[in-house]
C-alpha cells in the first residue's frame, strides 16, 4: 500500500511552499487528456502523491457531480479490496487537495462533502475534457450539415487537446476505471468523425498515416476499417484496402464470432468492382471544378448484353501460412483480381477464401467462356505451382459456368441465382487444383482452347527472358523475344509470370493482343500513357498534366518541351488525326526512350498470330528506334505466324525465338475437357 503524506500546508500568506505561486488569484485549470496536470496563475501546481492525484482524477471526471465514497474507494483500491484504513486514507487525500486549492484565492475549485460522498464544484470549461466535448459537438454538427472543411478544422482542434491516454500517469500506477475507457472511446469516435470529414475533403493522403496507425490499434472498429479501406483505395492501393477488410473480418470472427457489417461488405464489393462512386467525394470548397473530367479511353467498345461466364474460386491456405492468414488472403485476392482483369473479367465478390469473377461476351474478343477458363488456368498456375514456396502450399478448386442471366437481371455483373448455385455445386465436386467446367463452357472452349492446360515447369523459359531483360537494361538496345507454341501450351501464363518477375526492375507497358483491331496511333498512345503513368480512369486534364510532367522531365528545356507537348497532346485528344506525322513519331520516341532510360520498358503482346498487318508492322518498328532505347518486346504467337510473315524478325541482331516444349504424354485428352486438371 502506498503511504499517503499529510500533504503541503499553506503558510500565513496563503502560499503553498514548493507548489508554485498560485496566490495571485489566477483561476486553476486542469488537464486530464494525458497525464494529470493543473496550473494556476500561469504556474504549474503540484498535486501530491498517487492516492491524492487519483482522488482528484476521479472527481475531475465527474465535475459538479457527487461521487459516492464507495465509488472512490473502489477506484483507489479496486472493488472489495479496500483495507480497513481506506476511509481514513481517502479523508487525508481530500484534506490534502483542499490545502492545494487553498493556495489559489478566488480561483480554485471547491471540494465539498456532499452525500453520498464528495463533489468538486467549478466551471466545467476549466477542465480540458469539457473543452474537448464541446468542440466535438460543434464539429459533429458541422459535419452533419455537410460543412466538411469547417468540421475537420474544429475536430482537429479538439483532438489537439490530447497529450496521450487519459490520466496516463494514473494508468501507469495501476488505476483502471470504466470512465477512462469511456473517455478513450469518445476520443476514437471523434477521430472517426475527423477522418470522415477529411476523406470527404479529398485529403486521404494527408490522413493516411494517422488513420493506418489508429485502425491497426483498433481492429474491431468497423468504421475505422472502412475509412482506411477507402483511403487506401483512393491512394491506388487496392490490394492493401482488401487486406484491411480481411484483417477486420478475422478480428471480428475470432474475437466476437461476428461477420463484418453491411457497410464494410458493401465497400469491399465496390472496391472489387472498381465502383466509380468510390472516387467521387464532395469537392473542397476552395477547389474549382475541373474544366474537363471526361475519362481518357482509347477506342472504347460497348459491351453487348447476353451470355456470361462466371468463375467461383476456392483457395485453402496451406498450414505454413495460417499464422499470417490475413496477409495470405490479401495476396490471394490481389492475384485473383489481377489475373481476372488481365483476361477482361471483373472480380465482383470475395469473402474469406471464396471469390467470384464475371466475364461477359464482348465484340472483337474471345468468348467469355474461353477467357474465363484461361484466367482460371493462369490463376491456378500462379497460386498452386509457383516456384515460390509460400504459394506452393495453396490448394485451389475452381468452377467455370456459362449461361444467360435471368431476363429481370439488369446489373451487368449479376449472374443470377441459377448459375451461382451451379458454380457452387461444381466447385465442391472439383478435385485439388482442378478446374471444373460446365457442359456449356466445354462446348464453347472446344475450338478455342486445348483442354490439356496443366502446370508445366516454365522456369527455364523465365530464366531466358530474365537474361534478355538484363541485356536490354545494360546495353540500352531494344530486343524482341517471340514465344511460339500451340493452343493451350501456356504462352499467356508465361507472359503473366514474366510480367510479375520483370516488374521488379522494369516498367511494364500495356499488354497488347492480336485479338483486337487497333490502329498504330492507338498502340503508340497506350505505350505513351503507360510510360507517363496515365490510367484508364484518369480524366483528360489529369492525363495532360501527367504527360506534361513526363515531357518536362525528359526534355528539360522549357521551350522545347512546350513544342513536344503540343504535338504529343494529339494522343490525349480522341478526335486528333496527326498521330502519324514524322515529328509526332520522333517526339514519341524521344519521350518513351527517355522515360525508359532509368528502368527498361517491357511490352507484352499475346496472340500475335491473330494480329493484323498494322500491329505486326508496329511491333517490328519498335525494334528500330531513332536512338538507343532499353525496350523489350515479348510476343506470344502460334507457329502459324511464320506462315504469314516468313521473314519475321529476319536480319535484325536483337531477336530471340523461343519455342515451348510439347506437353508430356499422359495429360488429359480433349475428351476430358469438362475437367481441366
Image (cartoon, helix red, strand yellow):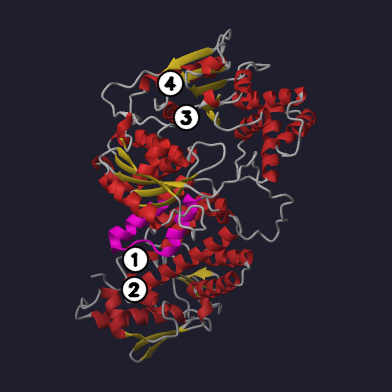
Q: Residue at x 68, y 16 (%)?
A: 626
The answer to if 254 sits in the magenta stretch is yes
Secondary structure, mark 1, is helix
> What secondary structure predominates along the stretch shown in magenta?
helix
Mark toward the start of the polypeptide (3 vs 1):
1
Q: Which residue is mark 4?
A: 485
Q: Position of residue 407 (x, y in %)?
A: 49, 58
> Residue 8: percent from the left, percent from the top?
38, 75
Foreground disc of the pair 4, 1: 4
* Within-10-Å neighbours for mark 2: few <14, some 14–19, many 20+: few
Magenta stretch encompasses residue 232: no
Dot 3: few (<14), some (14–19), or many (≥20) neighbours within 10 Å? many
Image height of 462 relative to 443, above or below: above
Q: Which mark is residue 368?
A: none
Q: Are marks 4 and 3 in contact (CB under 8 Å)?
A: no
Q: Which residue does the numbered mark 1 point to in the structure image?
A: 171
Which residue shows up at 76% across the image and 36% down it? 576
Q: Which quadrant would residue 335 be assigned to in this image?
A: top left
Check disc 3 and report the residue beneath it.
499
In 3D space, how far apart are the residues under numbered discs 2 and 4 (Cα atoms)?
Answer: 70 Å
Which residue is found at the position 58% from the left and 74% from the top? 141
Q: Residue furthest left?
A: 84
At x 38%, y 49%, the residue is 355
Among all residues in the image, which is located at the extreme bottom?
A: 115
Q: What residue is shown with label 2?
A: 178
User: Which residue is nearer to you in this view: 7 or 593?
Assistant: 593
Q: Nearer the viewer, mark 2 or mark 4?
A: 4
Amino acid at each position: 500500500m502506498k503511504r499517503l503524506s499529510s500533504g503541503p500546508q499553506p503558510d500565513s500568506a496563503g502560499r503553498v511552499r514548493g507548489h508554485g505561486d498560485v496566490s495571485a488569484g489566477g483561476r486553476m485549470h486542469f488537464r486530464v487528456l494525458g497525464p494529470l496536470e493543473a496550473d494556476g496563475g500561469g504556474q504549474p501546481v503540484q498535486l501530491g502523491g498517487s492516492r491524492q492525484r487519483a482522488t482528484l482524477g476521479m472527481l475531475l471526471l465527474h465535475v459538479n457531480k457527487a461521487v459516492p465514497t464507495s465509488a472512490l474507494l473502489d477506484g483507489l483500491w479496486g472493488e472489495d479490496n479496500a483495507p480497513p484504513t481506506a476511509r481514513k486514507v481517502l479523508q487525508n487525500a481530500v484534506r490534502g487537495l483542499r490545502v492545494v486549492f487553498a493556495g489559489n484565492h478566488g480561483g480554485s475549485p471547491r471540494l465539498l462533502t456532499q452525500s453520498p460522498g464528495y463533489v468538486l464544484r467549478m466551471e466545467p470549461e476549466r477542465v480540458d475534457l469539457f473543452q474537448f466535448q464541446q468542440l466535438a459537438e460543434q464539429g459533429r454538427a458541422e459535419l452533419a450539415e455537410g460543412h466538411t472543411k469547417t468540421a475537420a478544422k474544429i475536430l482537429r482542434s479538439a483532438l489537439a487537446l490530447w497529450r496521450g491516454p487519459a490520466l496516463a500517469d494514473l494508468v501507469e500506477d495501476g488505476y483502471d476505471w470504466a470512465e477512462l475507457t469511456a473517455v478513450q472511446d469518445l476520443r476514437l469516435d471523434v477521430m472517426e468523425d475527423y477522418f470522415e470529414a477529411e476523406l470527404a475533403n479529398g485529403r486521404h493522403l494527408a490522413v493516411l498515416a494517422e488513420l493506418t496507425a489508429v485502425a491497426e490499434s483498433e481492429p474491431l472498429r468497423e468504421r475505422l476499417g472502412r475509412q482506411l479501406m477507402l483511403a487506401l483505395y483512393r491512394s491506388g492501393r487496392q490490394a492493401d484496402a482488401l487486406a484491411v477488410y480481411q484483417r477486420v473480418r478475422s478480428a471480428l470472427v475470432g474475437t466476437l464470432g461476428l461477420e463484418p457489417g453491411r457497410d464494410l461488405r458493401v465497400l469491399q464489393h465496390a472496391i472489387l468492382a472498381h465502383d466509380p462512386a468510390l472516387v467521387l467525394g464532395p469537392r473542397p470548397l476552395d477547389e474549382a471544378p475541373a474544366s474537363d473530367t471526361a475519362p481518357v479511353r482509347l477506342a472504347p467498345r460497348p459491351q453487348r448484353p447476353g451470355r456470361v461466364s462466371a468463375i467461383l474460386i476456392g483457395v485453402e491456405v496451406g498450414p505454413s501460412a495460417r499464422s499470417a492468414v490475413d496477409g495470405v488472403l490479401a495476396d490471394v485476392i490481389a492475384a485473383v483480381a489481377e489475373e481476372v482483369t488481365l483476361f477482361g473479367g471483373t472480380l465482383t465478390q470475395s469473402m474469406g477464401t471464396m471469390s467470384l469473377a464475371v466475364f461477359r461476351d464482348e465484340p472483337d474478343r474471345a468468348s467469355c467462356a474461353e477467357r474465363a477458363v484461361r484466367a482460371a488456368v493462369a490463376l491456378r498456375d500462379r497460386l498452386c505451382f509457383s516456384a515460390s514456396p509460400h504459394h506452393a502450399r495453396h490448394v485451389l478448386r475452381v468452377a467455370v459456368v456459362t449461361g444467360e442471366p435471368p431476363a429481370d437481371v439488369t446489373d451487368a455483373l449479376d449472374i443470377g441465382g441459377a448459375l451461382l448455385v451451379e458454380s457452387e455445386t461444381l466447385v465442391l465436386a472439383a478435385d485439388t487444383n482442378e478446374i471444373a467446367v460446365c457442359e456449356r463452357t466445354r462446348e464453347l472452349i472446344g475450338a478455342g482452347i486445348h483442354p490439356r492446360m496443366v502446370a508445366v515447369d516454365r522456369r527455364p523459359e523465365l530464366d531466358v527472358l530474365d537474361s534478355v531483360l538484363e541485356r536490354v537494361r545494360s546495353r540500352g538496345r531494344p530486343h524482341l523475344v517471340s514465344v511460339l507454341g500451340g493452343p493451350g501450351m501456356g504462352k499467356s501464363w508465361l507472359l503473366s509470370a514474366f510480367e510479375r518477375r520483370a516488374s521488379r526492375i522494369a516498367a511494364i507497358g500495356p499488354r497488347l493482343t492480336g485479338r483486337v483491331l487497333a490502329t498504330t496511333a492507338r498502340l503508340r498512345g497506350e505505350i505513351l500513357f503507360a510510360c507517363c503513368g496515365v490510367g484508364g480512369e484518369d480524366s483528360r486534364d489529369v492525363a495532360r498534366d501527367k504527360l506534361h510532367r513526363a515531357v518536362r522531365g525528359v526534355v528539360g528545356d522549357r521551350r522545347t518541351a512546350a513544342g513536344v507537348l503540343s504535338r504529343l497532346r494529339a494522343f490525349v485528344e480522341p478526335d486528333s488525326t496527326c498521330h502519324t506525322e514524322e515529328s509526332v513519331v520522333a517526339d514519341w520516341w524521344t519521350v518513351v526512350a527517355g522515360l525508359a532510360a532509368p528502368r527498361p520498358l517491357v511490352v507484352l503482346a499475346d496472340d500475335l498470330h491473330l494480329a493484323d498487318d498494322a500491329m505486326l508492322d508496329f511491333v517490328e518498328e519498335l525494334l528500330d528506334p531513332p536512338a538507343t532505347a532499353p525496350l523489350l518486346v515479348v510476343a506470344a504467337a502460334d507457329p502459324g505466324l511464320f506462315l504469314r510473315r516468313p521473314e519475321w524478325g529476319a536480319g535484325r541482331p536483337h531477336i530471340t525465338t523461343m519455342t515451348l516444349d510439347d506437353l508430356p504424354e499422359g495429360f488429359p485428352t480433349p475428351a476430358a475437357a469438362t475437367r481441366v486438371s
